[in-house]
Amino acid sequence: MTDDSTPQTRQARLDRRPPHVTGQIRHPKFVYWRRRVVLVVSVLTLGYALYLGTTLAFALTNQSYGVSLSARGAEWGREHGMGSIVTWVEQRYYSLNAPKKGGDPSKNDFGSGSPDVNIPREGHLPAPATVSTPAKVAQAGEGVWHPVGRRTSAGIPAMYESFIRPDAVHTSYVIGLVWMDPTLLEAQLYSGSFIPGGGPYKHSAPILPKTTGNLVAAFNAGFRMQDANGGYYTDGKTVLPLRKGGASVVIYNSGKLTVGEWGRDFKMTSDVREVRQNLDLIVDNAKPVAGLDATNTLRWGKTLGGKFDVWRSGIGVTSNGAIIYAGGPALTIGSLADVLIRAGAVRAMELDINTDWVQFSSFNAKLGKFVNGGDGKKLLSTMVGPPSRYFTTWWNRDFFTMSFRESALTGTTTTTKP
């Protein structure tokens, strides 16, 4: 006879009872495995959601992601594999918020100051000719060049600015043009930890005070490298492979900047100091290249392509080597090419687009005086990015600067050969 007087013995007998007696139901093994999988997936999903939320919060408070919250959110989305979604949203937004047609801009939008400058005849390129407007009838002052920024020790302006309307349809908008003299100015490419990525680099933001005594201008570069369909070369190394046929800004050891097609207009030599590629040329032989109206995301950008009327910027070179910058609102890639040609460009390419990234600043102070963002003047008052961005440690995108050559400070002559 079994002794079940102890609690342990009684519990053992209860544990041996069938499930229908005890109320415990044992499921097949796959049920327990499924539960474990659901639990693991739930934990991972929650963790990823927390990660996305944390990184989004960081992006929305990070100035390097843009001035506006929408730009910061877009940059965050592209960084996290949502580029196609961001592009779709942007396209819907621009379709619903297209620039208005017709109208007139303010009479003060075409620049100020006398266009007549009493300067020596030699030691610089001839001043640019008035730009014809794409609009049907030019308004007073439209297309007229005005000296801007610092002047050489001999009082020669190295830059001129002009303002025209982008086309004959969006006539209430004004874009800015800048003409730069490479016989007086030398260029420098500043590289960022975000664009092109990597580093450290010899030249990165912030612009150091000791280098600003002859600083004349700073302006935006091109697309994020994953969207640029091109390469990047600086500090004697290839950061990203250069693409044959790619539109390229090339800076030589002499500080000369030029624009053209890689592999045709120039190739890698010991004289090349920096190369920044972005898409394909939009102007060649002083004409718009074929297919600017086509939906070709490789040639004109996989973000918005070339058909949307948005803020865009571009850079070109004239037949005598002068550099032309163009930037402003309501521009398709075709109208950007058109205004660059009107300003004298024989070859040109698109730089960055959208309001947060199109930014040109000129600087005006006594030669030798250190300057900062407070001394900068935006090409257009509607440019949302302040000149101070180039003087901050958080600015992590690439950009260009133009500074006086030593000869411009001493009054000696110079050449711009590589």
Image (cartoon, rainbow, N blue to C red):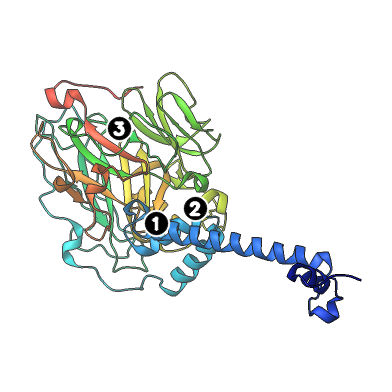
The dot on residue 79 is 2
Task: Say which quarter of the image contains residue 233.
Answer: top left
**Residue 312: numbered disc:** none
Residue 128 in percent (x, y) is at 24, 42
Q: Of circles 1 and 3, which is in front?
A: 1
The C terminus, quarter of image:
top left
Q: Residue at x 27, y 58 (%)?
A: 384
- In the image, 301 versus 203, the foreground residue is 203
- Residue corresponding to mark 3: 187
Question: Which badge, 2 or 1, comes first in the chain's sequence?
Answer: 1
In the picture, the disc for residue 59 is 1
**Residue visible at 34% across and 36% down?**
190
Q: Marks 1 and 2: in contact by CB < 8 Å?
A: yes
Q: Is residue 382 left or right of residue 148?
A: right
The quarter in which the N terminus is drawn is: bottom right
Q: Amino acid at mark 2?
A: Glu
Asked if residue 320 can be seen in this view, the reply is no
Q: Is residue 208 visible?
A: yes
CA separation in Å, label 2 and label 3: 30 Å
Query: Which circle, 2 or 3, is nearer the viewer?
Result: 2
Q: Secondary structure at mark 1?
A: helix
Name above or below for residue 396 compared with residue 66.
above
- Above or below, comparing residue 274 to residue 128 in the picture: above
Q: Is residue 364 left or right of residue 311?
A: left
Q: Position of residue 301 (x, y in %)?
A: 51, 52
